[in-house]
Image (spheres, rainbow, N blue to C red):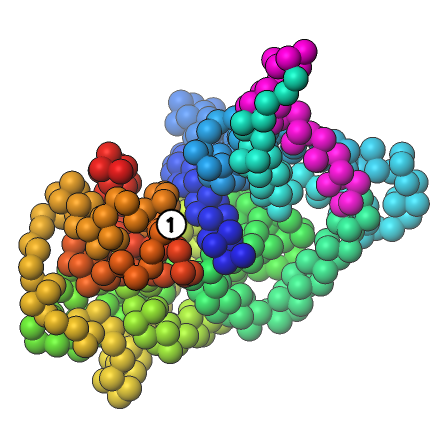
Amino acid sequence: MMKYLQKLGKSLMLPVACLPICGILMGIGYALCPATMQGGEMSGFLNLLGFFLVKAGGALIDNMALLFVIGVGVGMADDHDGTAGLAAFASWLMITNLLATGTVSTLMPSILESTSKTLAFDKIANPFIGILAGIIGATCYNKFKSTKLPDWLSFFSGKRCVAIISGVVSIVVAAILLFVWPIVFGALIAVGQGIVGLGPVGAGIYAFLNRLLIPTGLHHALNNVFWFDTIGLGDLSHFWAGETSADVSWSLGMYMSGFFPCMMFGIPGAALAMIQTAKEGKKKVAIGLVASAAVCAFVCGVTEPFEFGFMFLAPALYLIYALLYGIFTVVTVILGFRAGFSFSAGATDLIFSASLPAAEKTWLIIPLGIAAFVVFYLVFRFAIVKFDLKTPGREDDDLEAEKKVVLSNDNFTEVAKIILEGLGGKGNVKSLDNCITRLRLEINDYTQIDEKKIKSAGVAGVMRPSKNAVQVIVGTKVQFVADEMKKML
């Protein structure tokens, strides 16, 4: 199950990677044409250009569920074939049409008597159903892509039957959801209302759980509840739609704002603490790992290179790290800082979201950022020294083994070669894939894994979620390493 969830989490990163362009286009567009969300006359080249860019960015934001359909469908297919994406899209069309309010109310007129049930089917075209359709499409592809039918049906053999089977499965799933979806939706509404009812504390609990679930990939499910319009919240989608808190029932942006001081400034503070507490002979190793990760977190909000660099070395420290997110989110919400992101809480998204109508007191990022830097630094330094935590540069392994290979950061062929050797050679690798920052591999014999050898390539760390699964934390250049390794395999 864990392996399956990790594969799902990776596949979700494919559609999520489409979102930065939305933030850039809509941020520039709103800056050029405030009338797009504030009303008023739109005339002149700059205003019309801004309106054009807002609509371009909104094309993806407004259809995010479809991105999940195709991204999950292709991402979870064994060989990432586009046929799985087509099958997933067929599944999406089948489910959303069968469970549309008009269809359901005809089949079961009593549905219209319940406001919550009506709302449930009004919201059926949501990211959760998108992910479900993607899973159906990919699963049908993996199981039936090589199906051989009798001669008189041979035209539909192999991949051509996948979309048909997905459609049939989707009919069954829709029939089940006809009764199950209102119950699930009601439970999600209860969770969402509970968080909203807790105000800033609820936002802090969400931020804490978001970070805590990163290793399992389950944070994506949590994000769908609060960022997107699955249960009527949609903090992210409403923020980038040009709305304000007056248009919704919560303080718009409260489920995103707290991440900014933590990712932009807290992580650099924690990174400095790790560098300063590293062993004398290993400071350069620590700098190479956490300093670049901190820069990445500040600029674009990609935090995995930093988080996976220590979460398994010092899990207690990672728990503290998640708690700090929760605390700073509470403080941020109370102080009134509001910013949003389309990708993650880095400086890029902060700049482009600052012109949106829901953005408030963005200047507070300076004092909040300074506070986050200092607090993360002091807490990490104290915990590392007090409890002798094995953060990067403090491991009890042989320093000389790490010095055997000195690589250029761009020597991807050599990096891939060293990692492959550490994995036991190409004969020990069953499959290879990658997400934004990680190589994901299935292996035959876990005893052949040499983590020290893999780490000597300069990677951030090695994760072993199961007996036959290995993840190598490479960073944002992972695609280049994966391409070279695929050639070797």
Q: Amino acid at mark 1?
A: Glu
Which percent across, then down, holds residue 400? 7, 67
Magenta stretch bounds: 151-177
Q: Is residue 268 above or below residue 228?
A: below
For numbered disc 1, what is the local secondary structure? strand
Please give the name of the residue rendered at 65% of the width and 31% of the height, measured from the top-left corner.
166
Quarter of the rendering containing residue 375: bottom left
Task: Decide: is 228 above or below 82.
Answer: below
Question: Residue placed at 84% from the left, 38% from the top?
Answer: 104
Q: Can residue 161 be seen by looking at this rendering?
A: yes
- What residue is at 53 percent from the left and 70 percent from the top? 205
Residue 260: x %, y % from top left: 38, 60
Above/below status of 459 relative to 100: below
User: Does residue 152 show up magenta in the picture?
Assistant: yes
Q: Is residue 101 above or below residue 185?
A: above
- Residue 182 left/right relative to 394: right
Q: Which residue is mark 1?
A: 442
Q: Is residue 40 magenta?
A: no
> Where residue 436 sits in the image (x, y, percent)?
35, 46
- Residue appearing at x 16%, y 41% in the figure: 413
Looking at the rendered image, the quarter that the C terminus falls into is top left
Q: Is residue 66 visible?
A: no
Observer-nearest of 423 and 209:
423
Q: Main secondary structure of the magenta part?
A: helix
Provide residue 346's location: percent of width, then percent of height. Answer: 34, 53
Q: In the rendered picture of this protein, how many numbered marks are placed on residues?
A: 1
Nearer to us in this view, 267 or 329 = 267
Mark 1 surroundings within 10 Å by alpha-carbon count, few (fewer than 14), some (14 through 19), many (20 or more): some
